[in-house]
Amino acid sequence: MNTIRSQLFDTQITRILEHTTKERLATISAAWSAKPNLGQEELVAFLSEAMHSPERIQRILDTCTQFERTALALIKSDHFYDEITTIALLAAVAGLPAPKVADTYDNYIPEPLVPLFEKGVLFVVVGGYYVGSTRVSFSTPIEFLANPRVLTAAQAVDTQALRPFDLRAAPVPETTLSRRPQVVALGHSAFLRTLSATGELKVNRTGQRNIAAAAMKGLTKALDKQGWFTAPTVQPPSRSVVEPAIQPVPFPVEIYLNAAMSIGLLQFDEAKSVYKVTALIEDFMQQDFVQLARLWLTGLARTPNWHEDRPSSYSFYGYTLPMRSVLIMALALLGQNRDFTTVKHLSDAIFTRIGESFSLDPHEIRPTADIPRWENTRRQQRSAEELLALLKTWRIKLAQNWQKLELPFIERGLLSWGYGWGLVELGMTGDALSSIRLTDFGQAVLGFGDITDHGQRVATHAPGNGAVQVNKPQPGVWVVQPNFDVLVYLERVTPQQLGFIERYGERTQVDQHTAHYRLTRQSVYEALERGGALDALVSGLSVGSVSPLPQNVLRELQGWAALREQLTLRTLARVAEFPNAEARDAASVHGQRGQPIGDRFLRLEPKGSLQSPAIGVVDYSRPLPDCLTMSEDGLVTLDPAGRDLIIESQLNAWAEHVDRDHWRLTQANVAGAIQKGATLAQFSDTIKSRLKSKMPNLLHLAINNWAGVEHRLEVERVIAVRSQNVEVMQAISRSTMFKKLLRGTIAPNIALVNAAQINEFEAALRWLGIEPKSFGAK
Amino acid sequence: MAHNPPILHTNLTLIETADKTLLDMFFQDASTRPFLVARLSDTVAAVQPDKFEMLLNRLKKLGHTPKVLAE
């Protein structure tokens, strides 16, 4: 899709202008008040400078129509999909002059936006060059570029210019469902915590960075275990509330994952082909509830591979994001309206504004997008009445199709992210969704008054139900009990405090007004491992606590933290090994910094270096060097140049230490190692893999035998029969009579006879006329 | 110092204990012993390369809460 970028504007603008047609350049230059009669090069130089000038940018903005200004405000907003056709569509939903959405086959730019291109505020770029025309072919890869300074200077959406829907109030529903901002934020933090605990998410092998099914399954299971999405709904005092029988969110994990990817919370690690979490929960939760919701909404608006409704075909996919932005805009237009409205009415209101120019179905024919041409092609065959009748029929069909395709999409959007993120209150009739209205929180999130700039979020927003104004720790938001349970009052807790307690505690239950946590050794340990600190834990708990912390809890927390100090695993360490203690101490005296270990070792500081060159470097992240040789009798020789910290202990496990560089493999040592649980595979991994040359076969056989691998060897007594004459022996060995008495030949003139059959053999020789003699006899 | 240059061991995983007894215990325990390849001092030992995760899990199963530091 044709998204609008602004990041590369500065690096590309001069080249783009240089490749712009003379006519187009003249139009843009006139808009920026260039002097007449300038040459092409002068125009390019003038525009390159003018487009950086705040005064000239303001003058350009002053020439923009209400529609154009709104379009620019929508482009700079993070709420919506920043794609060119979607921007025009959103303006239409907002009740601004409806643009004719261009036929996608020959024109990518909606006509009402063309002036922004003629003013040089937006550019069409193909392969890095301005094409000089708004018309490009379907197959051409194109981009849209916006001047970031113009976007910065552009005002937020003028809400006065937007036309709210004329919606009939629906009857007050039997039951309503909504989610508190605090509960929504709990969902965000629970998701992130589970994701952090999961560590990494593997992708499948298609190369498209889709998360592997097994990883998704594992994450979903972990989230379900936490009751991630089953937090309670708000219950108005006068009505009863039931959980809907419908699934509130069709694919809750995907929506969060995609949103997390879109806003950079989950980043792809190219080297390991996995997704990793990039933010700590508590860092993320530094924002207030509205900011948090907007962040997820920003991700949602750019999440292409999750769909509110199951698409009818692949071609549907490309229209999910525009339609989702349309729904976000439609909800924003509900504004301060406190009445419930039916979903059907909302859907019809959207249809009225864009139904004839947009459909989720890309194959929907839209003759009204180009009525004159449509009429012209048929004028010769049809009368004006016939054409009008045709148009009427088409509109009826279009409305029917909208009910089949777009209405379910709107329903699912409301039931999924609309409800799930606390933006809308659902009116239920039985198990079915009947009507909706914005929650106070939804009004604050979707309010246009403080629409966000790119990368700069405005903290002010309308007060609302639970939309906490400040994100500073509030006193008296929880009770820490002597049994380590923490009871959190959701009404007053800030996102920062939710992030804090989510970090250190283990959530056990969420009720309508309270959340229950438990401080455990494991939860505190994990929090400390993720960068937490005992002081921060104690002070954070104390600030939010209704009463002073129980003494036993304080003592135990200190004990848990102290326990962690008892044992350290240090990875990626660098250790200098000196030949003796004197050498190590001399190095220290000469300024070599590091932590002494034992007599001969020095652990270098993280960024420290060796003052004198090392005699050798052993890198334990790589395969260790081949450094052993073995002889048939089991003597193992270690090449001192390949000595590392682990080879000696590995040799000691299998062999007897003879002297500094020699070991001997013996039956007792090998059998002993096997008895202690070692395996021949481990021998192969640790010792055999370090050999500089092949292990002698005989030693290999011996080690196998010593390790208990059975090799059967049968002994049989045979008698050798030798003839000086090879021909004699060949005649004997090949004869049928003798074959059954021989065990084989070991040389052309020597055959072997089974000792038990020697008499029979000698008798046969005598029959042959040969008197057998002993070896060496004359 | 120039006459006694050291060998530099890099990307090494170390286990460090607050007291000797604890490390002795790990060397005696059949479930942790295979991960420890060289004792550098009373309280520090080198861990077999690529076995960090397995040792960490093992220690946690034994009820320890090791501090993990990456340099």
Image: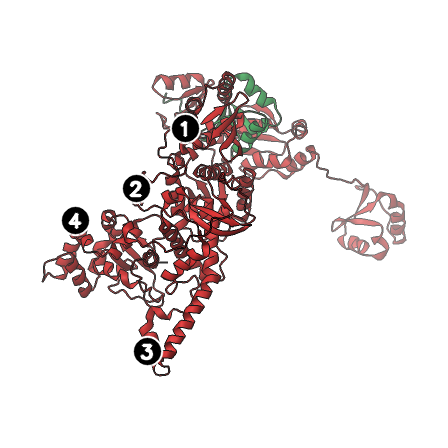
Chain colours: A red, B green
* A375 versus A435 height, above or below: below
Residues flagged by tags 4 and 2 on a common chain: yes
Q: Residue furthest bottom?
A: A380
**Label whose residue precedes the other's in the sequence (4 or 2):** 4
Mark 2–mark 1 Cα distance, whole angstroms, equals: 54 Å
Q: Which mark is residue A53?
A: 4
Residue tagged 1: A615
For the N terminus of chain A, the quadrant is bottom left
**Label whose residue precedes the other's in the sequence (1 or 3):** 3
Q: Amino acid at mark 2?
A: Gln
Residues flagged by tags 2 and 1 on a common chain: yes
Q: Are marks 2 and 1 in contact (CB under 8 Å)?
A: no
Foreground of the two, A87 or A207: A87
Question: Which quadrant of the structure image shows residue A610?
Answer: top left
Residue A695 percent coordinates (x, y): 59, 38
**Label whose residue precedes the other's in the sequence (2 or 3):** 3
* A285 versus A413 height, above or below: above
Q: Residue at x 48, y 57 (%)?
A: A408
For the C terminus of chain A, the quadrant is top right
Tell me if A544 is positioned left or right of B54 in this view: left
Tell me if A213 is positioned left or right of A331 in this view: right
Residue tagged 2: A456
Q: Residues within 10 Å of mark 3 (few under 14, many from 20)?
A: few
Residue A245 percent coordinates (x, y): 56, 48
Residues flagged by tags 3 and 4 on a common chain: yes
